[in-house]
Amino acid sequence: MAIPEKPRLNSPPPRPDLPVYTREEVSEHCDEDSLWYTFRGAVYDLTFFYNGHPGGSPRLLMAAGQDLEPYWEVYRQHLRGHVVDWMEKYRIGSLSPEEAAAASKAFEFGDAYENDPVRDPNLLPCTQKPFNGEPRIDLLTRDYITPNELFYVRNHLPVPEIDPEEYSLIVKGAGLKKKFKFSLEDLKTKFKKHEVITTLQCAGNRREDLHREGMREFLAPHWVVGAISTAKWGGVKIRDVLKECGLDVDALALGELEIPGLEHIQFEAYDQDETGVHYGGSVPASKVMDGLGDAIFAYEMNDEPLPRDHGYPVRVILPGHAGCRQAKWVHKVILSDRESDKPWHQKSYRHFAPDITFEKDMAAWPPERLDQAPIAQMMPVQSIICNPPQNTIIGGKNTNSITLKGVAWSGGGKEIQRVDVSIDGGDTWTAAELYKPIKQRWNCHWAWTQFYKTIELPDEIKEKLKRGEHVRLDLVSKALNSDFNVQPERMEPYWNGRGVAINHWYHVNTVLDPKQETGSVQRDETDVEFGGNTPSGGKFAVPWDMHGWSADPQHAGPSGFKVKSSTYYDDGKAKPAVLPTLSVAEKE
């Protein structure tokens, strides 16, 4: 009996039961009342999806009545397989083979990312367009402050090129008598400079942990683990700018004054998509009014002008909040009675209950109970073991201990008060040593805490090593913050269809080799797919393929993505590691 051929990735199956349409017929369905698309000979009716696309409706309208192949040559994250698989449910017909071949080559979609910056090779691209890159996590503990070159990058849209002489910050809205406009020079000369060290983490960090068969995530990027970094930011307090505009920020902060219509601060940025929609979001007004909130318009990062990827010339920094709220390339500040209506605020970063999925509920936006899906602002407590790296073999010859290093952080300014670590998957725990070289106020612990611990190996492990046996270790950490919140063990109870606020235990797979000398660390036989960054446990639950960028043979050519010839830690600029010098495994 012949074995059925496995369907090829992104290849719609033959459907002789469905009608055959012409490209001309498809092209007539190009408005919000009827949205048809073609892809590799299949015809889809996605009219119901008009409000469901996380990136906004205008992009769906842009491509309506056309073939998706040219668009997905740029946005290859659609080609990982599950997107086309989902679309097949809404297939209504096919093109003839001749029409299908012509449709895929009918036009070339312009690449809005061709002028993006050149990136460090150790900034691993979850998506190349827009660029979303996370550092190799084994580098995160080399310095307390993350180098600019390795600070994670979250771009929703192409990186704008802004002439600093032409830059303007516009402030308007409730409580103001007029619209105000500030230049970059105004921000640097009219206001006192303020600096703050804070950790940023993307609301969707570790999203790939939630993506598996039967529990699929449809919001990109699928961060693996490294969308977290720490920097010193310099700029001007947002409250000082608002005070210059005539607001009594002190009375507002103390609750002595209420201004009708002033509940939220909306930020709109210079970056925009192909249809002209600008990125934006908002935070409660009290955050920026707070004299101790450290909310700033930043123009420096680690004592240098902001890099383009991080918002040059001016961005918003809101310590304690999710990265998505801290708009880069900020252009407009709007004081309002409403939250931002941008899709990245209203759709992308909501935390839904585990039974609400993209396929069942979110595609036909809105789901019934948006009131049960809060918009992400603060982030939960998090910790990650960074060293030893995932899937490594550590020298076990005459070894009596193993040293772990990592980072921990909690949103909302909550202090990391303890990190517990385990080498047996969480059966037994011990407290790690904490390292934070800066002092921050109560409820203003904006920056992460690094941790390290040398753990004595149990006698049974030592005996196995003496007998020449390999020993597999399951390294894991859990952090406790000043509200006594602790990381959950598993992700299933809080799985959510947008993949946000992910903080279950992160397991690191490591093996002790009795034949290797103490202190040696090398990769095991596991394929290094993503610079060593992997989901919890050391493996991807479904094929990674660079989040779809290398998945499809028809889109395997050069993408125009540019990287530097050397990495930050290869060029002699690295500062001494801030943690004590500790070998990975020490002799007794």
Image (spheres, rainbow, N blue to C red):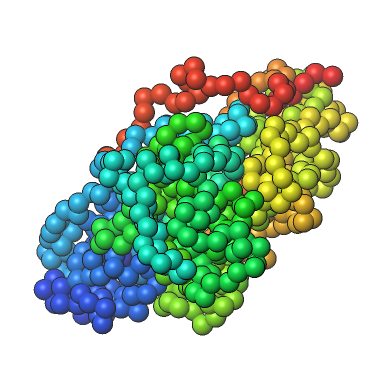
Residue at the (79%, 55%) spot, across then down: 484
Above/below status of 366 relative to 471: below
Residue at the (59%, 64%) spot, across then down: 252
Indicate the quadrant containing the C terminus: top left, top right, bottom left or bottom right: top right
The foreground one among 529 and 577 is: 577
Above/below status of 384 relative to 393: below
Pinpoint residue 221: horizontal percent, then vertical percent: 45, 53
Left or right: residue 367 versus residue 117 is right
Residue at the (81%, 32%) spot, across then down: 455
Left or right: residue 485 versus residue 446 is right
The foreground one among 93 and 313 is: 313
Indicate the quadrant containing the N terminus: top left, top right, bottom left or bottom right: bottom left
Left or right: residue 376 versus residue 120 is right
The foreground one among 178 and 204 is: 178
Q: Quadrant of residue 218?
A: bottom left
Residue at the (58%, 41%) spot, across then down: 196
Q: Is residue 220 visible?
A: yes
Pinpoint residue 401: horizontal percent, then vertical percent: 80, 27
Q: How many labels does the image show?
A: 0
Q: Is residue 554 visible?
A: no
Q: In which quarter of the image is residue 125?
A: top left
Pinpoint residue 351: horizontal percent, then vertical percent: 57, 67
The foreground one among 272 and 336 is: 336
Pinpoint residue 30: horizontal percent, then vertical percent: 20, 74
Above/below status of 77 relative to 563: below
